[in-house]
Amino acid sequence: MNGHGAAAPDRDQTRRLPLSSSEGAVQQCRDFSRAALLDWHWLAVEGGEWPDEEQVAVFEDVLLMVSELVTNACLHAPGGPRELRLRWDTVRLRVEVSDASPVPPELRPFADPGQPGGHGLRVVERLARAWGSRPEDGGKAVWLEVPSPLNHR
């Protein structure tokens, strides 16, 4: 048991979702990520209580950041995202979205927050512990990491 009423997950679990097009990719990746986080007990409860606010906030933040990375791949990479990878080692979650573009992402200058577009990586920068990109198979993988919400108690 992990102290939160659920069996602790095995260390270093990885889940992969191959993607073949941009159509529906954002929702597909959010659903895939939500299912993985639930399987990994990110909304663990103690003694029948609801998950605390921090757990819920980090859970929702991860889904938002997955959406942002996948959206960027849909908008800026030929063919859209190739694959979503989630790696969980009970201490941190690493999210990676690979695509066919070798061009690394860059933060856009601060823009009018009332205007649509150009804010996704700013969101990731604020919410993730770390993020970046690396070359992969002629394209790149954009990654982010967040700490476990289960370790703050």
Image (cartoon, rainbow, N blue to C red):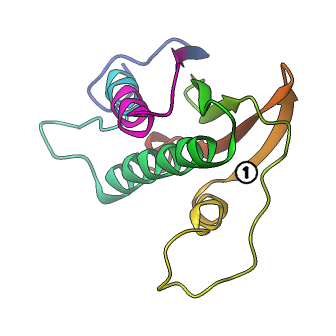
Depth check: 112 or 41 in front?
Answer: 112
- Left or right for 78, reference 57: right
Position of residue 127 measured from the top left corner of the image (x, y, whole percent): 57, 60
Q: Is residue 26 magenta?
A: yes
Residue lying furthest left in this view? 48
Depth check: 135 or 93 in front?
Answer: 135
Depth check: 18 or 65 in front?
Answer: 18
Q: Which residue is painted at 60% across and 24% down in the image? A: 87
Kindly indicate the quadrant of the structure image that contains residue 123.
bottom right
For the magenta stretch, what is the residue range?
A: 15-32
Look at mark 1 in the image and give the residue it sits on: 130
- Left or right for 13, reference 49: right
Q: Is residue 91 magenta?
A: no
Q: Amino acid at mark 1?
A: Ala
Q: Which residue is painted at 51% across and 11% down in the image? A: 10
Q: Residues within 10 Å of mark 1 (few under 14, many from 20)?
A: some
Depth check: 79 or 68 in front?
Answer: 79
Q: In the structure shown, which secondary structural element does the residue marked by tag 1 occupy?
A: strand
Position of residue 19 measured from the top left corner of the image (x, y, whole percent): 52, 20
Instruction: For the N terminus, give its image quadrant.
Output: top left
Position of residue 108 measured from the top left corner of the image (x, y, whole percent): 74, 71
Position of residue 84 measured from the top left corner of the image (x, y, whole percent): 56, 26
Kindly indicate the quadrant of the structure image that contains residue 97.
top right
Q: Which residue is painted at 57% across and 42% down in the image? A: 74
- Left or right for 88, reference 1: right
